[in-house]
């Protein structure tokens, strides 16, 4: 929300070529978006853009914010059209690349989403977050060979991020190139004293699954449920990539059932569970 307020203040501070009416509509759109009045913000931004006299900078903000409003309503095609307009004006707008990727993911356009995530990562190449997001999505869509170097890059850029270490290890298992020495070196740099450190220790063979499950059950409420969710996914995915499908399935089913949909583990858990069930429609338990 603060971004919208700052944007409005910045635009008010400098002269523009916009007419009074279109600029008033633009500010009306910003204010409506800040209040969460999505339909009003779409209407106001549309009026401002229709006037045709907004500066390029102001147009890009109006398209971006209207696109986000459309995305909030799950009107993905309209959102993408606005993000396209932003990127025509501002090709290096990472927020527009990221938002368009999310819209394309919702529509099932995986290749288009990957292109936008890669573009966003390359704009600020030393920011681990987009490499991490790109690698996770590539892995989720079974593009394992491409995912691995992107996840390794995320670890390199943020070596203390234990989640990135876990994902890099899953990716190595996925391409059948486990590397215990590399995992050990990455684990030493990661912050293993805190969650999800115990999962990395399980990957290294330093703790048993029973002990990991006991540690996951520590805590109360959302902390405990979050740790259990993550354990189910990271152990299930790790086992599945090693061909231990019978052991992985119940863990992944629990992850899909119990993980909050806002967790980064939820979409890949859904995808992997579907892939395993499709590949093993019967007889998995007998493995």
Image: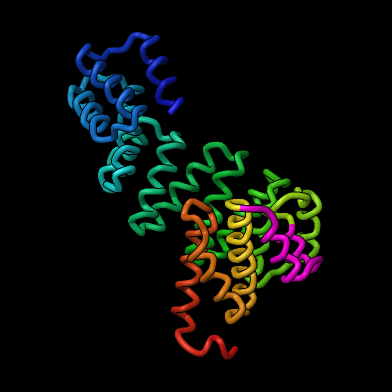
Q: Residue farthest to the front? A: 220
Question: Relative to residue 137, is residue 158 drawn left or right?
Answer: right
Residue 34 locus on image (x, y percent): 36, 27
Front residue of 209 and 89: 209
Q: Quadrant of the C terminus?
A: bottom right
Residue 138 locus on image (x, y percent): 51, 59
49 relative to 213, above or below: above
Residue 266 within the segment the image draws in magenta: no
Residue range in magenta is 198-220
Residue 45 locus on image (x, y percent): 25, 28
Display coloring: rainbow
Image point (60%, 39%), residue name: 127
Residue 101 locus on image (x, y percent): 41, 48
Residue 210 within the segment the image draws in magenta: yes
Question: Relative to residue 225, is residue 105 drawn left or right?
Answer: left
**Could you tell me what secondary structure mostly forms the magenta stretch?**
helix
93 relative to 157, above or below: above
176 relative to 136, above or below: below
């Amino acid at each position: 929300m603060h971004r919208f307020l700052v944007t409005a203040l910045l635009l008010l501070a400098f002269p523009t070529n916009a007419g009074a009416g279109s600029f008033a509509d633009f500010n009306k759109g910003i204010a409506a978006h800040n209040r969460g009045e999505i339909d009003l913000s779409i209407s106001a931004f549309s009026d401002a853009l229709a006037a045709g006299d907004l500066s390029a900078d102001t147009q890009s903000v109006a398209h971006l914010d209207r696109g986000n409003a459309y995305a909030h309503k799950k009107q993905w095609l309209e959102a993408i059209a606005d993000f396209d307009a932003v990127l025509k004006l501002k090709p290096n707008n990472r927020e527009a690349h990221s938002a368009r990727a999310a819209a394309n993911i919702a529509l099932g356009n995986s290749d288009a989403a990957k292109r936008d995530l890669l573009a966003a990562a390359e704009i600020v190449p030393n920011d681990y977050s987009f490499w991490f997001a790109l690698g996770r999505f590539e892995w989720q869509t079974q593009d394992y060979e491409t995912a691995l170097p992107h996840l390794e890059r995320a670890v390199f850029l943020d070596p203390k991020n234990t989640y990135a270490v876990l994902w890099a290890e899953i990716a190595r298992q996925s391409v059948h190139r486990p590397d215990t020495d590399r995992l050990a070196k990455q684990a030493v740099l990661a912050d293993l004293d805190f969650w999800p450190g115990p999962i990395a220790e399980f990957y290294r063979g330093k703790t048993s699954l029973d002990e990991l499950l006991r540690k996951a059950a520590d805590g109360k409420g959302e902390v405990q449920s979050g740790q259990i969710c993550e354990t189910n996914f990271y152990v299930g995915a790790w086992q599945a990539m090693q061909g231990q499908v019978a052991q992985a399935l119940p863990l992944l089913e629990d992850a899909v059932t119990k993980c909050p949909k806002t967790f980064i583990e939820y979409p890949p858990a859904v995808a992997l569970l579907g892939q395993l069930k499709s590949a093993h429609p019967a007889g998995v338990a007998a493995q």
